Amino acid sequence: MAGKNRDGSGQVQGAAVHWADETAERIIREKGDKDRYTCASGITPSGTVHIGNFREIISTDLVVRALRDRGRTVRFIYSWDDYDVFRKVPANMPGQEELAKYLRFPITMVPDPWGRDSSYARHHEADVETNLPLVGIHPEFLYQAERYRASRYAAGIRRALEHRETLKTILDTYRDEDHKIQGQWWPVSVFCGNCNRDETEIEGWDGEWGLAYRCRSCGHGETVDLRTTPVVKLGWRVDWPMRWEHEQVDFEPAGKDHHSQGGSFDTARHVCKEVYGWDAPVSFRYDFIGIKGNPGKMSSSQGKVVDLPDLLRVYTPCLVRYLFAGTRPNTEFTISFDLDVIKIYEDYDKTERIAWGDEKAKDETVFRREKRIYELSQSDTDPQGKSRMPAVKPFQIPFRHLCNLIQIADGDIEKTLAALVKDGKPPREDQLPGIRERARCAAYWIDECAPEEFRFKLRPAGGGVCRALGEAERSAVRGLRDRVIAGIENYADDKSCAEAIYRTAAESGMEGKALFRAAYQALIGKDQGPRLASFLRSIGKDRLMEILADY
C-alpha cells in the first residue's frame, strides 16, 4: 500500500490528506513563494495556561510542521502578552489577598505567589516553556513587556495615534449603536510611572512623539517620549494587527470567540490592512475543548483547570499530539480521563499499526491519512523540523493489558517490564523506553483517575481462604487451582485456557459465571475483574499457587 510519488514525510505529492497540510498549501498559495514564513501564536499569562490555550499552540505547531515538510523555512513565534493588565485574581492562585494588591498593574510586575520566579507572569510562562519541548514544540518566545518597555513598537504606536479617527471608524463598524465609541478616544493606554496602574487618562499628544497623561489613582502626571518611554502600550484590537505587520506574520489561528462575525479578528484584519499596510495572516477558527473524568486528585481542587502537565500524566507525548492531530481544529471535542482513556490508546495503536504496515487500511486514502496523523503525532522531528517516522518501531502493548500487568506487579513498573522481557515475544532493549513511558502513564491513571471498579490488588500469599465464599465456591476454586493453574504454562493462548476454565466449572457442577466470581473473590476480593484466562496467565503459576494455597 506504499503507493508511488511518496516523499519523505509520507505524503503523496500534490495530495493534502490532513488539515494541517491543507492549511500549509493555503498559506503558500495566498502569501506566495517566500524565503521564510512566519507562524504565530500567543496568550496573556494571567493564570494557568490551560488545555484550551494549548490547542492554539499545537494547532500552530502542526501547520509549522506541514510547511517544513514541504521544504519551507518557517519562523514559529509565541508571544507572551505579559504587558497586559492584571484584571482579576484567578480562584486557583495562592496568596489571594496579596495578589489583589496588584490589580491594574501590568502582569509582569505582579510578584510570584509561589516565590519561584521573578514575577507572576514569568511563573506561568516558565511552566509552559518547560513542558512544550516534551511534546515536540519549540517556538521562539517573544515577551511583550520586554518589547514595549524597550520602545520597539514606538513607530507602530505613533502610527495608531496618527490614524486614531480611522481606527475609531473601523472599531465602530463592528459595534451596534449602544456600544460605539463616545467622545474623545485614544488607541493607547498608559501604566502610571509612579503607581504602575493603568488608571490613567490621556491629556494630549503633540502630533509627534510626546504623549501627556495623568493618573486618576495617584494624581501623577507627565509627558513621555514614545521613543524612550516604557509605560505606553496599544489597546488589544490595535496591538494585535500592529504586531502582525511588525513580525510579518503569515499565519495565526484564533479561537471561535475571536473568529465570530464582527469579532476581534475581523477588526484586526481591517486595521492591519488600512492602518499598517499589511494583509492579515491566513487563519482558521479552533473550537473549545471539554473535559471528561477527573484528571487526578490534585486537579479536583476548586478553581483548578486542566493543563498540559495534567495530560502528560495520563497520555504519552505522542498520544497528546494525536488527540489534536487527529481532530480538525474547528471541531469541539472532549479529552477524557475516565475509562475512555483505554479507547483512545487503542485508537492510537491502530493508527500506528496502519502507519507501519502491520494492519491493512480500508483503502489508500485511509492509509495516507492515518500515516500522516501518526507522523504529526510524533514528538521528535528530523534536524530540519520535518515530520518523520520513529527511528525504532514501537513495541505495542495494549493499555488495558498494561494496566493489569502493573497492578499484578503491585504498581512496580520495572517488575512489569521484567515480566514482558520474560514473555515469549519480548520487546527489544531499544523498545523499552517507549514501554516505560506508557507504563508511567498507566500507573498514574490507575492510581489517580481510573474508576474504582477497574482497580484491583492481588491478595497476599498465605492470606487464607476468602470469607465471602461458600463451600461450593471454595471447592470450585480448588478445582481451578488443581486442574487449570497447576498446568497453566501448557496453554498456548487465552482461548485454550478459557476452555479449560469452563470445563472445570462443568466438572464442579457450577455455571461458568459463578466460577468466575469465586475466582475473582479468591484473587482480588471483587466479583469482577480482568478477563480471567488472560488474567491467570499474566499472574503466573507460582504466585497463583501461593495465593490459593490454603484452599
Image: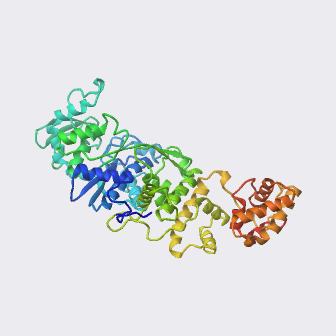
The picture places residue 497, in percent across and down from the top left corner, at 74, 65
Question: Does residue 530 appear in the picture of this structure?
Answer: yes
Q: How is the image coloured?
A: rainbow
Q: Does 78 appear above or below 481?
A: above
545 lies left or right of 42:
right
The picture places residue 45, in percent across and down from the top left corner, at 37, 49
Say which quarter of the image contains residue 543.
Answer: bottom right
The quarter of the rendered structure image containing the C terminus is bottom right
Q: Which residue is situated farthest in the top direction here? A: 177
Residue in view at x 37 percent, y 51 percent: 19
Question: Does residue 222 appear in the picture of this structure?
Answer: no
Number of marks: 0
Q: Does 390 appear above or below 213?
A: below
Residue in view at x 10 percent, y 42 percent: 208
The picture places residue 154, in percent across and down from the top left corner, at 17, 47
Residue in view at x 74 percent, y 72 percent: 490
The picture places residue 536, in percent across and down from the top left corner, at 72, 65
Say which quarter of the image contains residue 199.
Answer: top left
551 lies left or right of 333:
right
278 lies left or right of 500:
left
102 lies left or right of 550:
left
Q: Does 516 appear above or below 101?
A: below
The quarter of the rendered structure image containing the N terminus is bottom left
Residue in view at x 70 percent, y 67 percent: 537
